[in-house]
Structures are given as structure tokens and as C-alpha cells.
Image (cartoon, grey):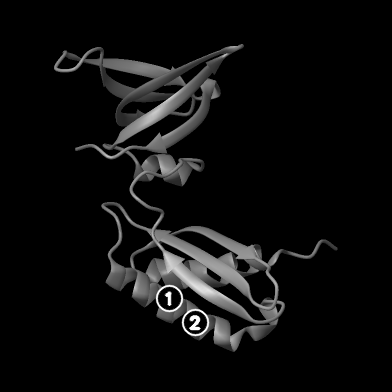
Amino acid sequence: MVQASPSELVRDLLAPAVAQLGLQLVDVSWHPGKGRAVLRVTVDRPGGVTIDECGQASEAASALLDRQEELLPGPYSLEVSSPGAERDLASEQDFATALGRKVRLTLQDGESMTVVEGRLVALGPEGLDLEVRRSKGGRLRAWRVSRRSVAAARIVVDL
């Protein structure tokens, strides 16, 4: 029988509580260290999270974890934060949350790499639809990108 990692156990425990706060559990990571480990919990929601919402998530996580001490191997510090303004997109949920926002995609075609920035306007099973400008002040045009060609993706701040 394969033992779940501390991150997986905490994710399963916290996901419903975070959802009740109207937030999405983006990531849980366990970082063992000398003496005291760090448990990092990342939460988000469309439009971003506030410091107060991170505080509420931290209180909810602390209360649940205090009742389930056996989940984590030893003392730890809990850190709850947002993923930040410019963050990587990895899961389907990450891409869904990024709909309507400006993204930077690194596309790979064999040995060739291309970077494209545009507004993510639609998601499909095979591709992503972007609105891109060829030049500053230029006309918007639709562009479909194959999901298989996406080597990396991240949200970018749109000022």
C-alpha cells in the first residue's frame, strides 16, 4: 500500500474547508527542514484573494490541522498565501481561472520555441483561443494554439 505524502493528505483535508470560504485550493506543499518544516498552502479565486481571505483560510486550516496532528510528521509552520499576480498555469483549473486574462505561452514545435502573449478567451479539449496583437496598438486577431504545443504558460500583469 502506497502511503500518501503530507501534501496530499493536507490537500484532501483542506479542500472542502477552503471551498466553503469561496476560495480554490491551488497548491499544498510540504518542505521538511532542520527542526521545523514549512507547510505552504496557496489559495485563489477569480479576481484574486485579499490578505483577509488568506487570514480566514489560515485560521480554518489551523483549526483542522490541530484536530488531525497525526497527518504531519513533526512540528511545522503554516504559510497561507495567494499564488501571486504572475503565476504559472499548470492544471485545467488554473487555465479556467485565467480566462479573460492576459497570458504568456511558450510554444514548442520540435526544436523551435515561440513566446506568445494574448488574452485567453476560450478553452477547448484540443486548443486554447487567444486574442493577440501583432504590434503595439495593432488590431486584435484571434489565434488558436494547440494544447500539445504549450511548453509553459503563465498569467502576466496587464497594465
Q: Which residue is mark 1?
A: 58
Where is residue 30? Give x, y as percent: 63, 65
Foreground residue among 74 and 120: 74
At label 2, which amino acid type do we have?
Ser
Horizontal side, residue 143 vs residue 145: left or right: left
Q: Which residue is mark 2?
A: 62
Q: How many marks?
A: 2
Where is residue 33? Give x, y as percent: 68, 69
What's the residue at 73%, 64% (across, down)?
A: 4
Examine the rendered structure and indicate whether residue 146 appears above or below residue 81.
Answer: above
Foreground residue among 96 and 152: 152
- Single out the residue that lies furthest toward the right: 1
Horizontal side, residue 156 vs residue 62: left or right: left
Examine the rendered structure and indicate whether residue 94 appears above or below residue 107.
Answer: below
What's the residue at 47%, 24% (across, down)?
A: 106
At label 1, which amino acid type do we have?
Ser
Foreground residue among 104 and 91: 104
Horizontal side, residue 156 vs residue 95: left or right: left
Examine the rendered structure and indicate whether residue 118 appears above or below residue 99.
Answer: above
